[in-house]
Image: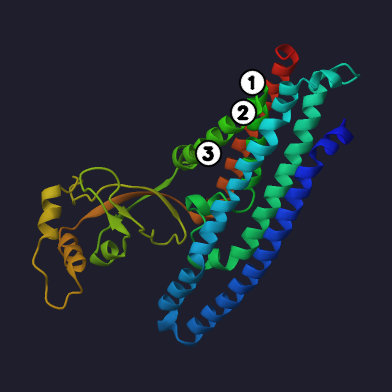
């Protein structure tokens, strides 16, 4: 049975091996280049500490877009595995009727499905895990310098989480093919379903895997100027990009609107008043004047965050959650093939 599965899978395995070799060659080159640039950045900081912020900004700007693109591409590998490996695996057999040939031999339905699932899920996990390990190695100096491993795209492309994604995507595709019984519809459903899951889980489930730490940050002019953007004062989190003092690299999962000293939310009228205040001479622009005006109101925000030390806990919990879902789908698939498929 294993030999038959390998014979059916050998073309996909060859394509995957070639793709992995190309990915490995590029990531080794990129990783070496990043390390050289990181050494130059550290040397510049050591010789002239005042140059550290611009040196870091340059180092980040040189590689951030490339690494984000690679991270997004790596997260497509599980989608490809689920769509092109998982969905046709059983659907094509059922569509053409070739499954009956195997079932008329000494192999039971459950064993037939279990061997296929185990063999190809391990292959998918190995492929995705190897690509993730290479990207994690290449990006390590960048991740250490920027301390941004909790961001949605980066987190899903580093270390062990992609292995869980690949196993679930493949299992999902196989079960969808078992239910739909047609190859092309099963591929379409699998691709859409897994992409939706990859959007829902990081935004709605991941923040709640562990209870966050909470703190209050006073909104000085420097803190307001350091924020990436400000939105509506009256609803939702209005400030993003704040650093939690004493916890570098923390993942800020929720920020309250600006609050006054008595705990009330700052009104939109007060914000507009600061936004439209006259410019101060030599103050560095309108936003700088707005920040000074807001800081005078003694504002603060309530912040919920995950310390950097919990990174591996989140990696483990998310991987376990995906593997658990894959296990549930496997049990369902084995039940379905035994009782419903003819």
Tag nearer the camera, 3 or 2: 2
Circle 2 sits on which residue? 186
Q: Position of residue 207 (x, y in %)?
A: 46, 42
Q: Nearer the viewer, residue 13 or 135?
A: 13
Residue 74 in sight: yes
Mark closer to the chain start, 2 or 1? 1
Label 1, secondary structure: give it. Answer: helix
Mark closer to the chain start, 3 or 2? 2
Task: Check disc 2: other Cα within 10 Å, few if <14, some if 14-19, many if 20+.
Answer: many
Q: Position of residue 212 (x, y in %)?
A: 44, 45
Please tell me whether residue 197 is drawn above or below residue 330 in the rendered image.
below
Where's the C terminus, which quadrant? top right
Label 2, secondary structure: give it. Answer: helix
Residue 171 in sight: no
Count of numbered labels shown in the rendering: 3
Task: Check disc 1: other Cα within 10 Å, few if <14, some if 14-19, many if 20+.
Answer: some
Q: CA distance from mark 3 to mark 1?
A: 19 Å
Q: CA distance from mark 3 to mark 2?
A: 14 Å
Circle 3 sits on which residue? 195
Residue drawn at x 91%, y 19% as measured from the top left: 106
Within the image, what quadrant is residue 144 found in?
A: bottom right
Tag nearer the camera, 2 or 1: 2
Query: By what rule are the colours in the image chosen?
Result: rainbow
């Amino acid at each position: 049975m294993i030999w038959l599965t390998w014979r059916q899978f050998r073309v996909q395995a060859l394509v995957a091996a070639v793709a992995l070799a190309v990915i490995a060659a590029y990531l080794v080159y990129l990783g070496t280049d990043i390390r050289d640039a990181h050494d130059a950045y550290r040397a510049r900081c050591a010789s002239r500490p005042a140059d550290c912020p611009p040196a870091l900004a340059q180092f980040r700007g040189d590689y951030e877009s490339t690494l984000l693109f690679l991270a997004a591409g790596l997260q497509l590998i599980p989608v490809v595995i689920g769509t092109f490996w998982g969905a046709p695996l059983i659907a094509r057999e059922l569509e053409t009727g070739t499954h009956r040939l195997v079932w008329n031999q000494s192999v039971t339905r459950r064993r037939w499905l279990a061997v296929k699932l185990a063999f190809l899920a391990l292959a998918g996990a190995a492929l995705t895990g190897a690509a993730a390990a290479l990207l994690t190695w290449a990006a390590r100096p960048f991740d250490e310098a920027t301390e941004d491993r909790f961001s949605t795209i980066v987190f899903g492309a580093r270390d062990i989480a992609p292995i869980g994604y690949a196993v679930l995507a493949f299992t999902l595709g196989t079960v969808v093919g078992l239910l739909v019984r047609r190859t092309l519809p099963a591929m379409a459903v699998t691709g859409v379903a897994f992409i939706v899951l990859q959007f829902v889980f990081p935004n709605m489930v991941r923040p709640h895997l562990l209870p966050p730490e909470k703190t209050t940050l006073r909104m000085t002019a420097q803190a307001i100027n350091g924020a990436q953007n400000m939105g509506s004062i009256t609803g939702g989190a209005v400030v993003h990009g704040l650093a939690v003092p004493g916890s570098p690299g923390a993942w800020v999962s929720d920020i309250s609107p600006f609050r006054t000293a008595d705990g009330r939310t700052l009104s939109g009228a007060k914000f507009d008043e600061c936004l439209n205040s006259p410019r101060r001479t030599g103050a560095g622009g309108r936003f700088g004047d707005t920040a000074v005006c807001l800081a005078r109101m003694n504002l603060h925000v309530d912040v919920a965050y995950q310390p950097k030390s919990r990174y591996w806990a989140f990696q483990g919990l998310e991987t376990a959650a995906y593997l658990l879902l894959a296990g549930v789908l496997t049990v369902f698939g084995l039940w379905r093939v035994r009782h419903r498929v003819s």
